[in-house]
Image (cartoon, grey):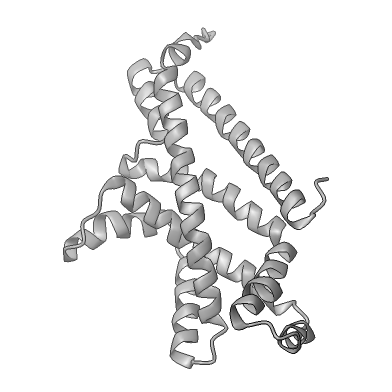
Amino acid sequence: MGYDFDFSVVWDAWPILLDGTLKALYYTAVSSILALVLGVLVMLMRRSNVSPVRITARVFIEVIRNTPFLVQLFFIFFGLPSIGLKFSVSFAAIAALTVNTAAYIAEVLRGGVDGLPYGQIEAGKALGLNRRQIFFDIILKPSVRAVYPGLSAQFVLLMLTSSVVASISAPELTYSAQIIESQSFRSFEVYFVVTGIYLALSICISSFLRLFGRFYFSYPTK
């Protein structure tokens, strides 16, 4: 029995898909910024000379990296309200994406910092640089440059992972697809188009990050 393709149902619902795409990009942008800040903080804690601080960071990283993102999302959205901490759908989605990505960013950055020559830091001190200058110019920027490809991959992965927040009815692209599919019963057409949108977003974000790396870090774009 043949199947009659009908992509008109998807075209007619383009405002819903556009809204979902913009919301997915919003979640990605906000979570990326917050995850980068939190990731740097956790990386510093992981390298701290104070044992409780270092252990806390290590436990955080291990817990996040060794549990499913979906479970983390459900814990924030369904679990925390049980003890009086109730969040909106968007807040829970961004919080889960931020916490999850921050753990991976912290480890990526730690690898970059560990790869720096110790003499580089000593040279900064010898030049009379203050602690802020040493951290940002001697430690952080070279470390980010060294691990930039891996860091970029984390941001692309974050965008793709944002599709999971549809499970708590966060109004992003996958959730929009579910709405259209439930109304039209055209699963193939809907998810075929949505797959193409995610692919296009991944390529665009990767290309943007490569260009950013080229101009900011003089990183090759091949």
Horizontal placement of 174 versus 142: left or right? Answer: left
Give the residue at x 43% y 90%. 52
The image quadrant that residue 180 belongs to is top left
Q: Position of residue 29 (x, y in %)?
A: 49, 47
Give the residue at x 47% y 13%. 11
Give the residue at x 62% y 41%. 205
User: Disc count in the image?
Assistant: 0
Q: Position of residue 146 (x, y in %)?
A: 74, 65
The image quadrant that residue 200 belongs to is top right
Judge whether residue 151 can be spotted in this image.
yes
Q: Residue furthest front?
A: 128
Q: Which one is nearer the viewer's eye here, 187 or 18?
A: 18
Is 11 above or below relative to 71?
above
Horizontal placement of 90 versus 116: left or right? Answer: left
Q: Which one is nearer the viewer's eye here, 94 or 188?
A: 94
The image quadrant that residue 113 belongs to is bottom right
Is 175 above or below relative to 189?
below
Give the residue at x 70% y 79%. 114
Q: Position of residue 165 (x, y in %)?
A: 39, 45
Q: Position of residue 13 (x, y in %)?
A: 41, 16
Is 20 above or below relative to 50?
above
Q: Which one is nearer the viewer's eye here, 119 or 17?
A: 119
Quadrant containing the C terminus is: top right
Judge whether residue 66 can be spotted in this image.
no
